[in-house]
Image (cartoon, rainbow, N blue to C red):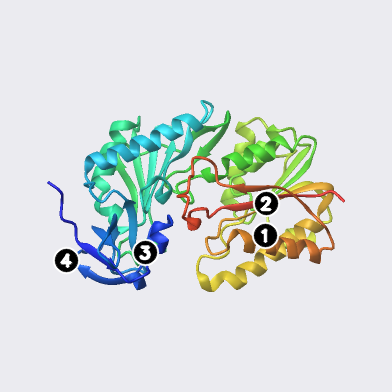
Amino acid sequence: MQIAYPGIILKKGRSTSLLRGHPWLFSGAIARIEGKPAAGDIALTRDFSGKPLALGFYNPQTDIAFRLLTRNCQEEINADFWRKRVQSAVALRSRIINRQTDAYRLINAEGDGFPGLIVDVYGRTLVISIATAGMEKQKKYILDVLLALTQAGRIYEQSEGRSRKLEGLENFRGLIFGNEQSGPATIRENGLQFEVDIPGGQKTGFFLDQRQNRETLGKISSGSRVLNCFCYTGAFSVYCAAGGAQQVCSVDISKTACAAARRHLAINNFSSADNPVLEADVFDYLRQTGECFDLIILDPPAFAKAKQDIGKAARGYKEINLQAVKRLAPGGFLATFSCSNFIGEEFFARIVLEAARDAGTDMQLLQKLQAGHDHPAAFGHQEGTYLKGLLLTKSY
């Protein structure tokens, strides 16, 4: 028997974004609620005329009041529904992740049809992050399916941040299945080795979204002097060293990150004496160094974590790109990134272009860079493509 889900009736003309493929509805689009759905409950959205549109999570406490689950309004959201969704995610990764890699994203929130859920794989360890009240209520189903369909020996949860607070959830971080990891986990990425502090690392432990970009830059680094700015634990540095770089210089303000970068060079048989790792502020380093490089990588943390940060963030992105362009050797490459959701792709490109112009340099665009294939985005969900990058060259 079909479950009678609570109803969301939209204002006239406010169903357009949902029909065009966007997975969210904002509170201002809602005309009225039928029933008494609580935060995280599943609701059926109808247009102004009463036509059923989609099932999804409802939360009256947030601006994003509805998050799409399915456009099949006859479906029941139960254990079987989630089993099919996880199976689909597993099948996709089995086709795009090579056998030399055992760390990747298994579930990428809306991109895989799981609003507010991230699941990352580190060998036989899973790390999950839940950001929505709806996903929190479905957590048991998800965990049961993950354990049934993967080889997970342990599962950590790292559910923290501003979005949980907005959804009315408390932060949570800890082991939820299996035995505690003893020491860092060793992972393989395209045959290279890295150690990941899963309980204590940033995000879910490692920036998996940059894997394909690391491959790309590693392939063009042969014989080059490379500068890896905001190096974190040195993954780009290792790829470039493996690609035959003449020297890789890594810079980060974090002492802990620098120590990890040196360790990663060492376990992949590269000398940190020949490939220095410097604990320094990147802005200061770029302004003060007199050296020029054949490849400069700029992968900073998010400068804009809220809308009010956009102006300050834009100035920060412009300054580091301006200084980087000045330090590029003729024919050199600049790989520059932003992971700020509030800095769009076109805006970011305009910032970098202005920086190049201020440096008196014309650049060629070789490639737009983005998250790897294990980080899919819903086609109509621009917000899901948070990582944007540009590969540029200073060739004339």
Mark 2 nearby-residue class (10 Å; few <14, some 14–19, many ≥20): many
Check contact, mark 4 vs mark 2: CB within 8 A. no
Residue under the point 37% across and 54% down: 116
* Mark in front: 3 vs 1: 3
Mark 4 nearby-residue class (10 Å; few <14, some 14–19, many ≥20): few
Q: Quadrant of residue 82?
A: top left
Left or right of residue 190, residue 43 in this image? left
Whole-angstrom CA distance, mark 4 to mark 2, is 48 Å
Label 3: which residue? 15
Task: Tell me residue 347's x, y (percent).
Answer: 63, 64
Vertical side of 113 occupied by 150: above or below: above
Label 2: which residue? 390
Check contact, mark 4 vs mark 3: CB within 8 A. no
385 vs 306, nearest the viewer? 385
Amino acid residing under circle 1: Ala
Label 1: which residue? 349
Amino acid residing under circle 2: Leu
Q: Going from the N terminus, do you reach mark 1 or mark 2 first? A: 1
Residue 209 in sight from this viewpoint: yes
Whole-angstrom CA distance, mark 3 to mark 1, is 31 Å
Check contact, mark 1 vs mark 4: CB within 8 A. no
Whole-angstrom CA distance, mark 4 to mark 3, is 20 Å
Label 4: which residue? 35
Disc 3 secondary structure class: loop
Left or right of residue 97, residue 43 in this image? left
